[in-house]
Image: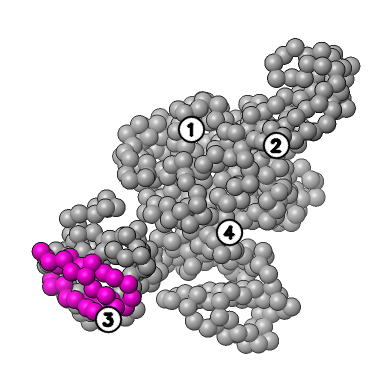
Amino acid sequence: MLCLGEFYCPGKLAESGRIPHHTATLRLYPGHLISPVVCPGTHNKHDSTNPTFRILDMTAIHPVILSGGSGTRLWPLSRAALPKQLLPLASDFSLLQDTVSRLTDMPEMGAPLMVCNVEHRFMIAEQMRQIDSTPHAIVLEPVGRNTAPAIAVAALMLSRDDPDALMLVLPADHLIGDVAAFHAAIRIAAVAAQNGHLATFGIVAATPETGYGYIRKGAALADCAGAHQVAAFVEKPDLATAQQYVDSGDYFWNSGMFLFRATDFLNELQALRPDILDASRAALDAATLDLDFVRLDPAAFEACPADSVDYAVMEHTRRAAVVPADMAWNDIGAWTALWDVAAKDAAGNAIRGDVMLENARGNFVRAETRMVAMLGVSDLVVVETADVVLVAQKDQVQDVKKLVDRLKAEKRCEHLVHKQVYRPWGWYEGIDDGERFQVKRIMVKPGEKLSLQMHHHRAEHWIVVSGTASVTCGEEVKLLTENQSTYIPLGTTHRLENPGKIDLHMIEVQSGSYLGEDDIVRFEDIYQRS
């Protein structure tokens, strides 16, 4: 229990929750917040020296983490099957893990509710397990419909348990350098939300950025110190206009983070976009439980209009509020954003991995699998992966998406998956291929197993490198240990399982007329994949 000291109140207050005496000692319990309110009997209702205080129960802030993006501007590291929020870009943890972890020191926070692409569900569950976080739920979107439907589904879920639930909506892929300032902004926004406002976080604009939308602040809120009415949302400006915004001090970068009561958001959505609310409710009402996941009904959710929460609600509601925040925020929208926040050497180079530089200045270099050596170059972005190397001028990286669009048009796969592909049981990595053969490394986690399956067009040879494998081949089940191998004939039902306590590592050699991943017939699968 924390004693905050004495507060003077000139009028006798009889209302529940306010200080009933002229002078009182206020004690604050963990998970609660104090909010200034107007004190009856004062000569000046705006006199900040004579406040009363209301205790706000903050034990019900529910983080809603939106993890549906694909992060194409950070290709080739970010790909459809492994987008940027699941990558360790700025620390040893993924952006998603950092997003959840930076809330753990706030006792008022509940378990996170995750909304994600159905294809990423097992990776998200595993990353939460790695940081000892148990989500309130992991909601699976069958298709992307932008942020308004995702937030609507989360609000519907939370409001069914608690109509007054506060929801803190956070993208999974942002960096925040000043966590203490972030926490302070959340607590201000929570006060605004409890007073019926739909709060967004406006980032103090230190530079005239043309890649962000802006929020223009209005009058200060009478019922929440530190927050303002929203005067306008402004689209991305040109450089001269952005400089005017910064110079005025009235404009803030639009962070895409929000805090409001679930029911308040749903009421506004009902008034402004009932079509989105109806479709989201239908998708949730027909949802099914799939292991630890909530799988939204595909037909209902696909019928939902796609729209951002800004366009659907925030730009039109009269209840929008903005909390200015200076918290070293970065949305990691391009490779240069990582260069901005990274540690640099004396020549301004930011490097990660096996990198050797000579007479090089101002470069961002990331090596994933091999050495990258650079001589006599400056202001480049170089990103090396097992199958792609990107080299770009720093002032051109916003156009990386054009390369991704070309890959899609040419029906290539480098924008979809890495050579190492993650599965709920572990991962596999292609290491060689040629006419009628393919070689893979396979890792199976302890206690996990692949589906009981069969292939029409290929046979397989399995060699155990380390660990123990339980192999089902037809009617036979046998154990293999290091340096042992087995053969799976074409058309034979088979399964691989790791019964041991350590990772199972294997080499698989496939041979046959067709080696595509879609040549698989599953008879039984503990992960309920089709």
Q: Which residues are magenta?
A: 461-490
* Front residue (pair 29, 66): 29
- Residue tagged by mark 4? 333
Helix or strand or loop: what does disc 3 sit on?
loop
Mark drawn on residue 297: none
Whether residue 232 is visible, yes or no, is no
Image x and y of residue 530, in percent: 24, 52
- Quadrant position of the N terminus in the picture: top right
Q: Where does label 3 land, which residue?
A: 483
The picture places residue 525, in percent across and down from the top left corner, at 24, 54
Could you give the CA–CA distance between mark 4 and mark 2, rounded to whole angstroms?
Answer: 27 Å
The answer to which of 55 and 185 lies nearer the viewer is 55
* Residue at x-position 17% and y-position 55%: 523
Label 2 is placed on what type of residue? Ile
Kind of residue at disc 4:
Gly
Mark-to-mark CA distance, 3 and 1:
52 Å
Distance, label 4 to label 1, CA atoms, is 30 Å
Q: CA distance from mark 3 to mark 4?
A: 46 Å
Q: Which mark is residue 158?
A: 1
Q: Quadrant of residue 471?
A: bottom left
The answer to whether the residue labelled 3 contacts the one labelled 1, judged by CB atoms less than 8 Å apart, is: no
Of the image marks 4 and 1, the number of the one nearer the N terminus: 1
Mark 2 and mark 1: Cα distance apart in space:
21 Å
